[in-house]
Amino acid sequence: MTFEMFAPIVLKNGLQVSFIEKSNRYFGDYHRISITAVVSFPDNYELPTGLSKERAKLEKKLEKMGVPTAQLETERNKLVETFLSTSRVYLERDDFPQQLLRKLQQEKSRPVFLRNH
């Protein structure tokens, strides 16, 4: 399993989008591309009381199965580009950081043993 983090992209509203790859080869020449897109607040962003830096983020999993070795780079780039082209306008809205914080504050924290990390 490879583990690679791409350089973060800074959006117009200050949010950062990072891509963490956790792909693996699962059979012969075929791979599973697995990239987690993480939308997080910049370090200097003042978070509301009770919301930790670890919880103040949005994660979206991007996956594709059955990718031959020769097409890995192309398919990896397509996944990231598709995510950015479909969600960037929404994520860059001026009011999105406040909406995300409201949503995160309303969610209950999951117990450690139920987390997928």
Image (tube, helix red, strand yellow):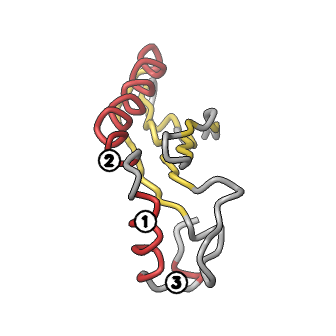
Label 3, secondary structure: give it: loop
Is residue 4 rendered to the left or right of residue 110? right
Q: 112 above or below 1?
A: below
Q: Could you say which quadrant of the image residue 100 lies in?
A: bottom left
Q: Determine crowd level at label 3: few under 14, some 14-19, many 20+ residues with C-alpha closer than 10 A.
A: few
Q: Residue at x 49, y 40 (%)?
A: 12
Q: Identify residue for label 2.
A: 90
Name the amino acid, label 2.
Tyr
Q: Is residue 3 above or below residue 95?
A: above
Q: Residues within 10 Å of mark 2 (few under 14, many from 20)?
A: few
Residue 86: where, in percent of width, then height? 28, 38
Q: Amino acid at mark 3?
A: Ser
The residue tagged with tag 2: helix, strand or loop? helix
Disc 1: CA contacts within 10 A as few (<14), some (14-19) or many (>=20): some
Name the quadrant containing residue 3. top right
Q: Mark 1 or mark 3: which comes first in sequence?
A: 1
Q: Which residue is mark 3?
A: 109
